[in-house]
Image: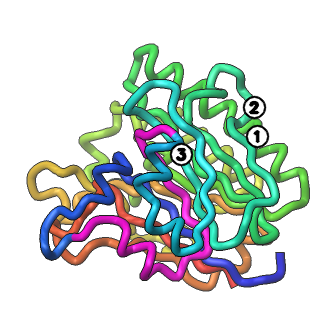
Amino acid sequence: MTRPITVSTVNVNGIRAAVKQRSSDNPGLLPWFKETIADVVCLQETRADDEQLADALAPALADGWHLASAAPHVKGRNGVAVLSRAGFDGIRIGCGAEEFASHGRYLEVETADLTVASVYFPTGEAETDRQREKERFMAAVAARMAVLLGSGREAVLCGDWNIAHTENDIKNWRGNVKKAGFLPQERQWLTDLLATGWVDVVRQAHPGVPGPYAWWSWRGKAFDNDAGWRIDYQLATPGLAARVAAARTERPAAYALRWSDHCPVTVAYA
């Protein structure tokens, strides 16, 4: 990869809800596509089939964005997508594990001389079958990432990982040490994954500080108090990570301006 590229990722918490105008001051997601400097945008939790997704994003597609998507196998859940200003040279649905092939949790594309994946990890629930399913998905994604890392091609996996890696990645870490998303084995899995060579580029750009968070509960004063979680990552191959020029979260200026409980995480690779 030789050209500069900017990549954004956001969990939209339902694409049809995200694109709706919520007030005169909050027109929803679609104006963001007109304003963003991103060349590639990864979406998670679209909660829509391919037709519904394309319909919701019709204005953006009319402006020239190209769309690839992986629809969920259960109506109203999961779903991931990638939009690119350039076309796609390849599209892969699923990370290679048959169990998750149709779940709408992993989509990989080749675009602009780069491999980009949009990934949505299960939330999990400590000591339940839901957590064991999450851990099987974690293992399947790690296996795919090992293949990508060994391929020699620059790649970035973007999405909602539903794991806060360190105490700096969650405001109320003390209250969540026994809950899914901050379990010791999840955090260790991410530590081990980064040890193989993948780079958490937002943390690389913001070392040793709380946040920057990209998810806040709709409830209470979580957003106003910035009591958030950093669970939306871009993990890049070492060569790509060395080219990071800027990394930021696009936190809305006010609660009333939110169109998702997440905000975009945007990284410029020079």
Tell me if residue 97 is in the magenta stretch: no
Q: Report the front residue among 97 and 164.
A: 97
| Residue at horizontal 47 percent and vertical 33 percent from the top | 122
Vertical arrangement, residue 245 with respect to residue 11, above or below: below
Tags 2 and 1 touching, CB below 8 Å: yes
What residue type is disc 2 on? Gly
Residue on which disc 3 sits: 80
Q: Report the front residue among 248 and 19.
A: 19
CA separation in Å, label 3 and label 1: 17 Å
Residue on which disc 1 sits: 144
What residue type is disc 1 on? Arg
Q: Report the front residue among 39 and 127.
A: 39
| Residue at horizontal 73 percent and vertical 77 percent from the top | 242
| Residue at horizontal 32 percent and vertical 71 percent from the top | 251
Tags 3 and 1 touching, CB below 8 Å: no
Q: Secondary structure at mark 2?
A: loop
| Residue at horizontal 28 percent and vertical 54 percent from the top | 261
The label number, if any, that marks residue 226 in the structure image: none
Tell me the quarter of the picture where residue 25 sits. Answer: bottom left
Q: Quadrant of the N terminus?
A: bottom right
Which comes sooner in the sequence, label 3 or label 2?
Answer: 3
Q: Secondary structure at mark 3?
A: strand
- The magenta region covers 27-49
Vertical arrangement, residue 91 with respect to residue 104, above or below: below
Vertical arrangement, residue 69 with respect to residue 122, above or below: below
Q: Secondary structure at mark 1?
A: helix
- Give the percent coordinates (x, y) of residue 195: 71, 52
Residue on which disc 2 sits: 96
- Within 10 angstroms of label 1, few (less than 14), some, or many (20 or more) residues? some
Whether residue 174 is visible: yes
